[in-house]
Image (spheres, grey):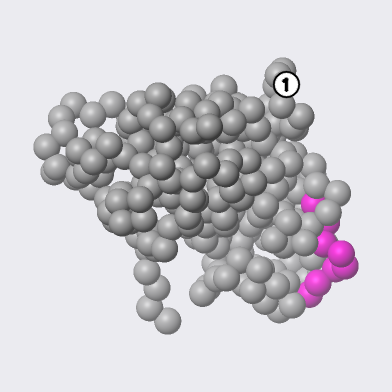
């Protein structure tokens, strides 16, 4: 029996309900028809033009991406921007793009931050910013998690641990506070807004991304902020999406993108 794009949408909605996405978000089917039969799925963090090219070479007609390529309305599609070029190529070649964004950030277990916490070895995790949810999915809804390491770590050991677990080149952080790290808060992507909740939950550290210079002062000697980069804090989502598909569908092949879509490079 064949699988349609709508079947994938229904499955995603059953574990990461689209109604949990933030008001600014655009998690949805962005290109393509729900009725299309799925020939293959390419999982990615970003649905950019190079990923559409990869989908074509791998025989995939559905790109399952974390970040929506379109967040707001387009007034023209002329190919002037990377967004427009991606849309043109996807539409021209009948490639569906399905974005699973803040709805997947907001579910536990099985969501982006759940995997983030697992990678760091955190246990006894609690949601930082709960969301009301009524539905059939057996989930706890909310943004960010806080949990405990197996044992306290000093500064160097902890930073090495995070760098290794998250495969990082560098870490930006606020000054050390002179105590062992045991309780850790995580929020994949741009998570500065959960800082008050992380402090209230007794976290020694908040690991997230996209902190601006003046926002680092908000640590106020109450917590340590680690900014590990947006892409770096969420790239594990590619494997998470791949597992979701391969463990639940068998009528087509699913692939993890080999395209590094991180727009930020480092000179070390």
Q: Residue at x 70, y 48 (%)?
A: 114
Magenta-colored stretch includes residue 149: yes
Magenta-colored stretch includes residue 54: no
The image quadrant where one finds the C terminus is bottom left
Q: Nearer the viewer, residue 254 or 192?
A: 254
Crowd around label 1: few <14 · some 14–19 · many ≥20 (10 Å): few
Q: Position of residue 64 (x, y in %)?
A: 45, 43
Give the main secondary structure, helix, strand or loop, of the magenta stretch: strand
Q: Residue at x 35, y 26 (%)?
A: 33
| Left or right of 158, for residue 97 | left
**Which residue in the protein does label 1 denote?**
136
Q: Residue at x 73, y 41 (%)?
A: 109
Q: Nearer the viewer, residue 83 or 157?
A: 83
Q: Quadrant of residue 152?
A: bottom right
| Left or right of 97, for residue 170 | right
Q: Secondary structure at mark 1?
A: loop
Q: Quadrant of residue 135?
A: top right
Q: Residue at x 11, y 37 (%)?
A: 78
Q: Which residues are magenta?
A: 147-154
Q: Position of residue 129 (x, y in %)?
A: 69, 35
Q: Residue furthest bottom?
A: 268
Q: Position of residue 88 (x, y in %)?
A: 20, 39
| Left or right of 93, for residue 72 | right
Q: Nearer the viewer, residue 268 or 43?
A: 43
- Residue 223 in view, yes or no: no
Q: Answer above or below: position of 169 versus 255.
A: below
Q: Position of residue 203 (x, y in %)?
A: 77, 52
Q: Residue furthest front?
A: 1
């Amino acid at each position: 029996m064949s699988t349609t794009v709508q079947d994938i949408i229904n499955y995603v909605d059953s574990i990461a309900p689209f109604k949990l996405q933030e008001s600014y978000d655009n998690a949805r089917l962005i290109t393509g028809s729900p009725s299309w039969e799925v020939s293959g799925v390419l999982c990615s963090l970003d649905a950019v033009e190079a990923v559409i090219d990869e989908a074509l070479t791998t025989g995939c007609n559905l790109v399952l991406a974390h970040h929506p390529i379109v967040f707001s309305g387009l007034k023209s599609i002329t190919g002037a921007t990377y967004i427009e070029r991606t849309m043109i190529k996807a539409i021209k070649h009948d490639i569906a793009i399905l974005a699973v964004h803040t709805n997947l950030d907001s579910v536990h277990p099985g969501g982006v931050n759940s995997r983030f916490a697992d990678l760091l070895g955190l246990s006894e995790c609690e949601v930082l910013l709960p969301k009301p949810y009524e539905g059939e999915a057996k989930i706890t809804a909310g943004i960010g998690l806080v949990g405990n390491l197996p044992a306290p770590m000093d500064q160097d050991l902890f930073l090495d641990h995070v760098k290794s677990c998250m495969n990082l080149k560098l870490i930006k952080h606020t000054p050390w506070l002179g105590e062992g790290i045991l309780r850790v808060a995580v929020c994949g992507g741009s998570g500065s807004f959960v800082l008050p909740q992380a402090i209230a939950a007794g976290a020694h550290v908040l690991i997230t991304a996209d902190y601006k210079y003046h926002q680092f002062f908000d640590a106020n000697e109450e917590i340590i902020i680690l900014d590990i980069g947006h892409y770096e804090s969420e790239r594990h989502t590619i494997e998470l999406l791949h597992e979701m598909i391969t463990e639940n569908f068998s009528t087509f092949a699913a692939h993890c993108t080999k395209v590094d879509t991180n727009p930020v490079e480092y000179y070390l």
